[in-house]
Image (spheres, grey):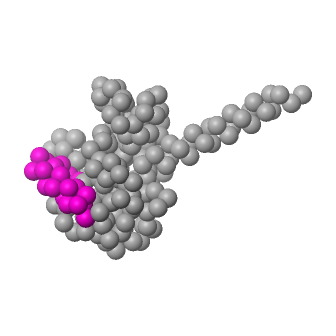
Amino acid sequence: MTDRARKAEQFRALHIPGEPLVLFNVWDAGGAKAVATAGAKAIATGSWSVAHAHGFADGERMPLALAIDNLGRIVGATDLPVTINLETDVLFQRPPEQHDDAMVVEAITRARAYAEAGADGLFAPGLVDITLIARLAEASPLPLNIMVGDATPPLRAFSQHGVARVSHGPRAYLMAMKALGEAARAAAGDANIG
């Protein structure tokens, strides 16, 4: 078995409905090293964070070649399995309060197509209603990945409703950029004293 195949199998095995794998998303090789050192079982990127770290808006505006080159550096920085988000998000088309059964049915249809094409999981970012999450987890032929947000239920609820993976999406990037901005303002303020 090749190293790539071994890592793919290792990653698949981490997705257990009801016992979600929790991933803290990164945007570069340095972040991958930090998250790996913190005890992560796998590394995940987030399309929003990667795009913004490279000066692009999310929404397929970052050149694919640049995203793949960045992924190569991340993979080279860790021995852990790595997954990348390249944007196939049905539920981000409308705000959470507009999510309904029809959107879940569309996500299930896509999940079946993804499974037939060889995908290992279904990412449903933006979905926050626990009833819809439970329906999707039950009907999906693939393990379900939900993104944590301010409006999502606690991890315990995901576990009770069959979610196999929880991603933190752009939260880490936003926290890091906030800390960087605060440090820069403090440094600029210190330079102006005296």
Q: Foreground: 41 or 69? A: 69
Q: Foreground: 138 or 24? A: 138
Q: Residue at x 35, y 59 (%)?
A: 98
Q: Residue at x 74, y 37 (%)?
A: 186
Residue 18 screen position, x and y as percent: 31, 70
Q: Residue furthest bottom?
A: 160
| Prevailing secondary structure class for the magenta stretch in the rendered image | helix
Residue 90 screen position, x and y as percent: 27, 50
Magenta highlight range: 101-121
Visible in this render: residue 120?
yes
Q: Residue at x 30, y 25 (%)?
A: 65
Q: Foreground: 187 or 3? A: 187
Total numbered badges shown on the rendered structure = 0
Query: Quadrant of the rendered structure where residue 26 is?
Result: top left
The quarter of the rendered structure image containing the N terminus is top left
Residue 57 screen position, x and y as percent: 43, 33
Q: Is residue 26 magenta?
A: no
Q: Residue furthest front?
A: 98
Q: Residue at x 83, y 28 (%)?
A: 192
Residue 90's place in the image compared with 20, above or below, is above
Visible in this render: residue 164?
no
The quarter of the rendered structure image containing the C terminus is top right
Q: Residue furthest right?
A: 194
Residue 152 screen position, x and y as percent: 43, 63
Answer with left or right where residue 131 lies relative to residue 189: left
Q: Is residue 109 magenta?
A: yes
Answer with left or right where residue 181 lies relative to residue 84: right
